[in-house]
Amino acid sequence: MNVLVLGSGGREHALSWKIAQSKNIDQLFIAPGNPGTASLGTNVAMGVNDFDAIADFVRLNRINCVVIGPEDPLVNGLTDFLRNTSGGKDLIIVGPSKAGAALEGSKDVAKAFMARHNIPTAKYQTFTAQTLEAGYAFLETLQPPYVLKADGLAAGKGVLIIDNLPEAKTELKNMLVNAKFGNASAQVVIEEFLDGIEFSVFALTDGKYFVVLPEAKDYKRIGEGDKGLNTGGMGAISPVPFVDEKLMDKVRSQIIEPTIKGFEIENIDYQGFVFFGLIKVGDNPLVIEYNVRMGDPETEVVMPRIESDILDLFALMHKKELNTANITFSNKTATTVMVVSGGYPESYKKGMEITGLENVEGCTVFHAGTAMANEKLVTSGGRVMAFTSLGDNKEKALEQSYSAIDKIDFTGMNYRMDIGFDL
Ligand code: AMP
Ligand code: GLY
């Protein structure tokens, strides 16, 4: 198979790494990719939202399978576009239609979908600038803290959790009237605060059947002990010790099955990954959010635990035969630790030379924000590289990730020393 992976982060490097191991791979292209993916296939200078260029590339290079890494092109309708322009029905596209991607593109769409299918989630209401007063009144009926969510995509920044009522009202107005998150906050979902522990579950679905992939827990805050600003993710672990069989049975029957059934009932064309952002409250799982793609850095721990050939799974997905998939996982624990630029998630410098990578062993390094400059590897983003290890337990895996990180250096380098501290 000729495969095109779209995206340029650690997630796409990990997906490409897994695809490159398939017995079915012929040519692997990554657009735009990064210096890490360049060692697995051919990087192509093409943006993930450049639909025409992607469609031409798919035709010219006889691509059989397109894997869409990030949410943006999905929400913008790339899957529908490719289906109509290149490859027709034979092209395997990993990533849902625009209608499916709206589950991530609009929090209101996601909440309404969950309500229609009785999927457990926080109570909510949605408001616009015209219904600001009703929004204030709804806030008054809730207990603090108050959860305000911009309806649309806001690069992971659109959720505010606020301790007191006056400030919550002010922020609601900022979002609705003063466009705090631009058009993304033209609608705001206000929801009940859920107190529990979060985890992520992933499924690959063909729209009718699904396989559940290894679950993971990510660490979003910049600081140790889960303190400080939110980031794209500072590390992840899989499996998650508190996610036992009993909890997974509930996730499956109360959340995954009704979600996939919902796609069928509502005729939503969905082939690809579903990322269930979950929270365990007492003994029960609830949905915090849906994402319509894999997580980053969760992919960097999920892919290494999948033993099955991923292109076989994608082919079964395309044929709507995932019920026949025989997927196996490693029992080992996978950990990933993200090395970031000093200052991130606020402003940081780029172009710092990264040294010592040749000395790393016993660890897989997935590139996220790196670039080549004058034949040197340099930083080019906030999250720079993810250090993934597999071990008999989380302590052993983490030890490998951390001793690998000790071998590398760049000016301003930062990472969390306490990934997995709460498990
Ligand atoms: P989201 O973008 O919906 O995943 O929200 C970002 C983060 O805000 C989540 O990962 C949670 O930590 C937190 N969060 C969102 N909704 C709630 C809620 N209803 N109760 C408690 N925390 C929440
Ligand atoms: N790690 C969270 C996400 O990918 O959205």
Image (tube, rainbow, N blue to C red):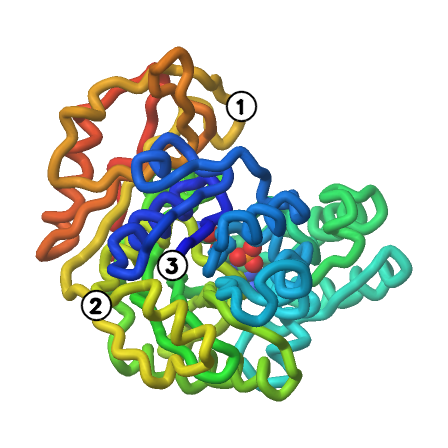
Q: Is residue 254 left or right of residue 184?
A: left
From the top left corner, tell me how far across and down residue 23 is, in percent: 25, 60
Q: Could you tell me if residue 116 is visible in this image?
A: yes
Q: Is residue 105 above or below residue 408?
A: below
From the top left corner, tell me how far across and down residue 374 is, in percent: 39, 11
Q: Which of the marked residues, 1 or 2, is nearer the chain's N terminus? A: 2
Q: Is residue 326 left or right of residue 199?
A: left
Between circles 2 and 3, the one closer to the viewer is: 3
Q: Which residue is mark 2?
A: 329
Return the residue nearer the eye: 229 or 391.
391
Q: Quadrant of the N terminus?
A: bottom left
On whether ligand 2 comes within 8 Å of the CB at mark 3, the answer is no
Q: Is residue 252 left or right of residue 293?
A: left
Q: Amino acid at mark 1?
A: Ser
Q: Amino acid at mark 3?
A: Met
- Element under disc 1: loop
- Element under disc 2: loop
Q: Which residue is mark 1?
A: 347
Disc number for residue 283: none
Badge 3: few (under 14), some or many (20 or more) residues near its Cα, within 10 Å? Answer: some
Farthest residue toward the top?
A: 374
Q: Is residue 314 above or below residue 225?
A: below
From the top left corner, tell me how far across and down residue 251 is, in percent: 40, 78
Between circles 1 and 3, the one closer to the viewer is: 3
Badge 2: few (under 14), some or many (20 or more) residues near its Cα, within 10 Å? Answer: some
From the top left corner, tell me how far across and down residue 397 is, in percent: 15, 48
Disc number for residue 1: 3
Query: Where is residue 326, by image quadrant?
Result: bottom left
Between circles 1 and 2, the one closer to the viewer is: 2
Q: Which of the marked residues, 1 or 3, is nearer the chain's N terminus? A: 3
